[in-house]
Image (tube, helix red, strand yellow):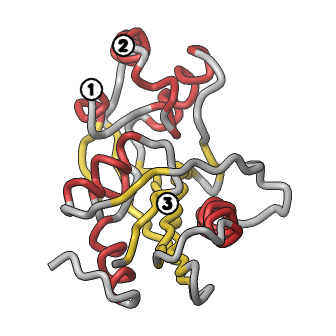
């Protein structure tokens, strides 16, 4: 029986995997998430997703007491505006500036995913890109949203699955990618490892 491990502490990713009816465990990896190599955003999210999955896969492989087969899933999401990566805001002022820069405009949300078969070391990486258009927002609307505290742990300072949904005018692409895990693309990749959602 294949054991799935999610290499992420994101409750949103966990909920999305549960939505697929998959049985999995969670192990989190501490990695350096800075872009020290100067990668493009689409390359960076795939690199970080792979790094997260690889750390967990290596720790499982070192535990010779287990004879199960493991598949590790890693993911990383960033918000990109005008080729600039917007991470999680450092504070409320940073959140305000991010939302001010996004309001009334299109931006991209990119999620890199990595899947590693621990036993064979086979792996796949991919990236999903969704375009998001924010509504025109007043400073009062932005401040009211920040007061909810929701933006402070979200890339780009908003969460589309929460109160931040009212800030979004439209999206072009996968909604679940904006939440943090493109589950349709992930299910396609998992088929390569004998895991069928349907």
Quarter of the view holding residue 62: bottom right
User: Taking 143 as reference, is 173 left or right?
Assistant: left
Say which quarter of the image contains residue 196: bottom left
Residue plotted at (58% across, 89% down): 120
Q: Are marks 1 and 3 in contact (CB under 8 Å)?
A: no
Q: Secondary structure at mark 1?
A: helix
- Sequence-wise, the earlier of marks 2 and 1 is 2
Q: Position of residue 182 (x, y in %)?
A: 35, 64
User: Which residue occupies the extreme right position in the image?
Assistant: 36
Does the image show residue 41? no
Q: Which residue is mark 1?
A: 163
* Mark 3 or 2, nearer chain start: 3
Q: Nearer the viewer, residue 149 or 169?
A: 149
Image quadrant in which the N terminus is located: bottom left
Please tell me which residue lies in front, 152 or 9. Answer: 9
Which mark identifies residue 110?
3
The residue located at (28%, 47%) in the rendering is: 15
Q: Is residue 179 above or below residue 52?
A: above
**Answer yes or no: do the residues labelled 2 and 1 have beta carbons within 8 Å?**
yes
Of callouts 1 and 3, the N-terminal one: 3
Q: Which residue is mark 2?
A: 148
Comparing 25 with 54, the one in front is 25
Q: Which mark is residue 128?
A: none
Toward which corner of the image does residue 174 lie, by quadrant? bottom left
Spatial separation of the CA atoms under disc 1 and disc 3: 21 Å
Q: Residues within 10 Å of mark 1 (few under 14, many from 20)?
A: few
Looking at the picture, how far across and down is residue 80, in whole percent? 55, 52
């Amino acid at each position: 029986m294949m054991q799935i491990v999610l290499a992420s502490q994101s409750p949103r990713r966990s909920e999305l995997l549960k939505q697929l009816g998959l049985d999995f465990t969670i192990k989190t990896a501490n990695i350096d998430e800075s872009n020290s190599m100067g990668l493009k955003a689409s390359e960076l999210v795939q690199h970080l997703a792979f790094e997260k999955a690889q750390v967990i896969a290596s720790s499982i492989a070192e535990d010779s007491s287990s004879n199960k087969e493991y598949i590790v899933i890693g993911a990383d999401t960033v918000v990109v505006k005008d080729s600039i990566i917007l991470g999680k805001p450092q504070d409320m002022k940073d959140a305000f500036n991010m939302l001010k820069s996004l309001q009334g405009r299109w931006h991209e949300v990119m999620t890199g995913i990595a899947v590693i078969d621990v036993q064979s070391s086979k792996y796949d990486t991919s990236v999903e890109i969704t375009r998001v258009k924010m509504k025109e927002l007043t400073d009062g609307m932005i401040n009211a949203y920040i007061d909810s505290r929701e933006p402070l742990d979200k890339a780009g300072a908003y969460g589309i699955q929460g109160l931040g949904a009212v800030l979004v005018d439209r999206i072009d692409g996968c909604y679940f990618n904006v939440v943090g895990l493109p589950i349709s693309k992930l299910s396609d990749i998992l088929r390569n490892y004998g895991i069928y959602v349907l």
